Image: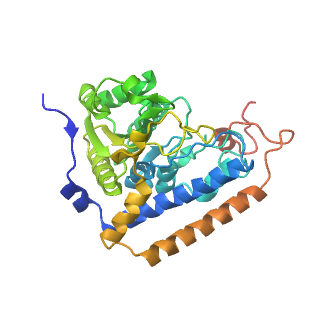
Amino acid sequence: MESALKTVSAEETESVATSEDVVELYRWMLRARLFEDKVAAMYRAGKIKGGVYLGRGQEAFSGALGFALDRQKGDVFAGLIRDQAGRMAFGEPTIDAAQAYFGSSLGPMRGRDGNIHRGRPAEGMPAMISHLGASISVVNGMLMAKRFRGESGYVGGAAAGDGATSTGAFHEGLNQAAVEKLPLVIGVADNQFAYSTATDRQFACEDLADRAAGYGVEGYSIDGTDMLECLSTFQNAVERARAGHGPQLVVGKLLRLSGHGEHDDASYVPQSARESRYGRDCMVVARATLLEKGLSDEASLSEMESSIQQEIEESISQAQSEPSPDPAKDDWRCLSEDRLVDGSIQSSH
């Protein structure tokens, strides 16, 4: 049987993505990095409650998946804790993220469910599930529902980390998607550590993409620090899924450039990993790429950063000024039930 593992050459990478796509993806990556830098600073200052988990180093990989999907075609995207770039590229407004981090009752989750379990399911963005791997089955269900309604042309994107691939939920979800030939693209960020557990203590195969053949799906192994390779590969994978080729498993090799959370100093990461090719900062690589290829210049990039920074400051200021939920007055129905209430039919509590 011929291997299902696909590889992408540098020539193919440069020929698939347009110049406009590349610059736009960088914009989403930069927005995510600047937003999370601000969030981290405010967490250290005691202004944010709960944990803070950054996607530093994963912006190219995550952002490329979110960017390759198309909400106008009915696509859905389930991001995880390190997918701020993917969420924003798919369509999450900065204010939604800010409201969740500051517990605003006016935000998408009304300040009820921590600062990372957020989403807008009706708009194709299911809220994150902390039980890693579980979101794949959720996306499968959303895709099956579309199939039952007679819809077509949609794709589902689901994010996972290397640790999530060791869970039963990941196996069951991917196996179901393969059997049903669902238009699913799974982006696995192989960031070398599941919290503090190194990958050589998680799996014995040389590359997680090698597992694709065992499920009967197409797999890709790429440099997750290379914005162009990430964008080209995800665009190709999404279009193959949309064209009926079934699930696509994309594994991006990179390094998490922060601890598991802001509470973790990542002292278990060896210096050799930090100095390796996959220890590169994808933001630095992406910026250099834009300049080297003449896709932008220093002045334009500086203007972009200033504009995004202003937007972030405005969103955070707004979120901080909004009320928190009042436990004595809040209507504690599940959020999805609100649309069932028309004044005469009341959902049971």
- Image quarter of residue 273: top left
Q: Residue at x 22, y 61 (%)?
A: 15
Relative vertical location of residue 136 with respect to residue 30 in this rendering, above or below: above
Q: Which residue lies furthest to the left in this view?
A: 1
Relative vertical location of residue 312 with respect to residue 261 in this rendering, above or below: below
Q: Which colour scheme is used?
A: rainbow
Q: Residue at x 66, y 48 (%)?
A: 100
Q: Residue furthest bottom?
A: 299
Is residue 221 at all visible to an observer of this figure?
A: yes
Q: In which quarter of the image is the C terminus?
A: top right
Q: In which quarter of the image is the N terminus?
A: top left
Is residue 202 at all visible to an observer of this figure?
A: no
Residue 111: x and y in percent read 72, 44
Q: Which residue is drawn at 46% across and 38% down?
A: 142
Q: Residue furthest front?
A: 271
Left or right relative to 249: residue 327:
right
Left or right relative to 293: residue 313:
right
Relative vertical location of residue 190 with respect to residue 170 in this rendering, above or below: below
Q: How many marks?
A: 0
- Image quarter of residue 50: top right
Residue 120: x and y in percent read 57, 47
Left or right relative to 208: residue 55:
right
Residue 118: x and y in percent read 60, 44
Q: For this rendering, which residue is in front, 221 or 168?
A: 221
Residue 135: x and y in percent read 48, 34
Relative vertical location of residue 57 with respect to residue 162 in this rendering, above or below: below
